[in-house]
Image (cartoon, grey):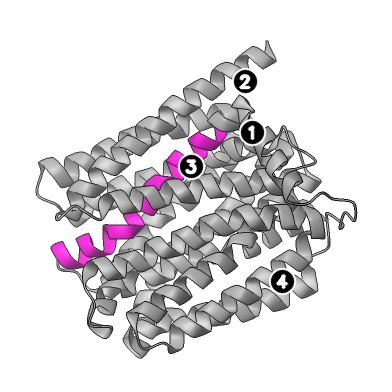
């Protein structure tokens, strides 16, 4: 497949997870009243989604290596659709939480298979280029999704984002069936669970993989951490509406799209690995700015918007090079390596969201978690760069 077609398909199958997260956030405060639940129970539905999304990637990756990219994607997207319908129709917070878990499991294969397809077809700078173009599309979707979710709620209340998710599931099934060509044919002689465990063991023993994946996971966790509580800060503490929150997210998430375009412009002059250093530095600066905005000064919409926009801008420079680095050593295990990277990323995001939950003041929790994640990203990148530089010498 061409770079352009690969880019669109990787964005399509990989976008279900982030879109389902971003569409949902404006509705979270309303779910408290809709289900007669408390804030902690509603936040837990997001943590459960993370858990399903992260854990299922460990299964979907080896399955995609064993049975092929297309059938595994179709099966998991069907599961996502079932979870979306269930969440739309349920009347209790307990069942809603269960169906959100099913949604997370179903969305898992898309992110894994999207990156694996790129690794099947491209390497090095061409891989980073396709991943960057894919990230532009992935960034554009979640950028507009909160605004769409917030505006849709004006017509259909808290169920509106779930209706959109059902439509996304149906559309994804149809387009995968029509457009996705198999890039990894089934392997009849593939080993069973012992082989899967052996593959994962060999991957995690590779320090080049470990440090590049920790860089990715820590950087992305800053986004997932703010997704857990930002609606409560903007709507609950600052007093804005769900629609205003959606429009805010439209503006700040544009930072990711802007950063991805900047990455594309800079790539011909500097390689993706060096540009990741710029992204990690920007992440440290922007998380520090958010800490100053929320912890040391009276919280303001402008301070939150600028800081989070900077975090997303910085992530756009980190991810293409570091994703490419994490998959580079494993051409025959791209599905498993992609799955393990996705699991590590989502697990780190889950830990971050859980760490925020006990704080009575969500602003303080967000500040502490994001500073820790940015520091871990900087340390991990430094360790990876030492290995990369010594290998290039």
Whether 217 is among the magenta residues is: yes
Residue on which disc 2 sits: 388
Sequence order check: which comes first, mark 4 or mark 2? Answer: 4
What is the count of numbered marks? 4
Q: How far is the residue under mark 4 from the one under mark 2?
A: 37 Å
Image check: 296 left or right of 166? Answer: left
Q: Which residue is at the front of the view, 387 or 268? A: 387
Q: How far is the residue under mark 1 from the one under mark 4?
A: 28 Å
Residue on which disc 1 sits: 325
Sequence order check: which comes first, mark 3 or mark 4? Answer: 4
- Give the image location of residue 68, x and y in percent: 80, 59
- Give the image location of residue 383, x and y in percent: 51, 21
Answer few, some or many: residues within 10 Å of disc 4's Cα (few below 14, many 20 plus, some between 14 and 19).
many
Q: How far is the residue under mark 3 from the one under mark 4?
A: 26 Å
Image check: 288 left or right of 134? Answer: left
Nearer to us of marks 4 and 2 is 4
Residue at 69% in and 47% down: 336
Q: Quadrant of residue 286?
A: top left
**Magenta-highlighted residues:** 212-238
Residue on which disc 4 sits: 74
Answer few, some or many: residues within 10 Å of disc 1's Cα (few below 14, many 20 plus, some between 14 and 19).
many
Residue on which disc 3 sits: 217
């Amino acid at each position: 497949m061409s770079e352009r077609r690969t880019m669109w398909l990787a964005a399509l199958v990989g976008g279900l997870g982030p879109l389902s997260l971003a569409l949902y956030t404006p509705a979270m405060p309303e779910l408290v009243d809709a289900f007669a639940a408390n804030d902690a129970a509603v936040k837990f539905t997001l943590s459960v989604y993370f858990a399903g999304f992260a854990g299922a990637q460990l299964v979907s990756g080896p399955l995609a290596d064993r049975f092929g990219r297309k059938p595994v994607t179709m099966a998991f997207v069907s599961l996502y659709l079932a979870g979306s319908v269930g969440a739309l129709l349920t009347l209790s917070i307990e069942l809603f939480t269960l169906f959100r878990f099913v949604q997370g499991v179903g969305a898992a294969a898309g992110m894994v298979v999207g990156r694996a397809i790129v690794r099947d077809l491209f390497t090095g700078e061409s891989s980073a280029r396709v991943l960057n173009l894919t990230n532009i599309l992935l960034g554009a979707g979640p950028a507009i999704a909160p605004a769409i979710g917030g505006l849709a709620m004006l017509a259909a209340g808290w169920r509106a984002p779930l209706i959109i998710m059902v439509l996304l599931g149906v559309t994804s099934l149809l387009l995968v069936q029509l457009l996705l060509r198999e890039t990894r044919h089934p392997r009849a002689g593939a080993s069973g669970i012992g082989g899967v465990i052996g593959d994962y063991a060999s991957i995690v023993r590779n320090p080049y993989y470990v440090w590049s994946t920790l860089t990715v996971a820590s950087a992305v966790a800053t986004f997932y951490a703010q997704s857990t509580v930002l609606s409560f800060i903007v709507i609950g503490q600052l007093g804005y509406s769900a629609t205003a929150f959606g429009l805010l997210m439209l503006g700040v998430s544009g930072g990711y799209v802007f950063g991805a375009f900047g990455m594309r412009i800079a790539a011909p002059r500097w390689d993706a690995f060096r540009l990741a250093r710029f992204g990690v530095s920007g992440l440290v600066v922007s998380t520090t700015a958010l800490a100053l905005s929320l912890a040391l000064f009276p919280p303001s919409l402008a301070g939150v918007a600028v800081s989070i926009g900077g975090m997303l801008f910085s992530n756009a420079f980190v991810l293409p090079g570091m994703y490419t680095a994490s998959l580079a050593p494993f051409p025959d295990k791209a599905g498993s390596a992609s799955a393990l990277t996705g699991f590590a990323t989502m697990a780190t995001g889950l830990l971050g969201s859980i760490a925020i939950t006990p704080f009575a003041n969500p602003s303080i929790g967000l500040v502490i978690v994001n500073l820790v994640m940015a520091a871990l990203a900087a340390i991990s990148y430094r360790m990876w760069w030492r290995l990369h530089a010594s290998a290039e010498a």
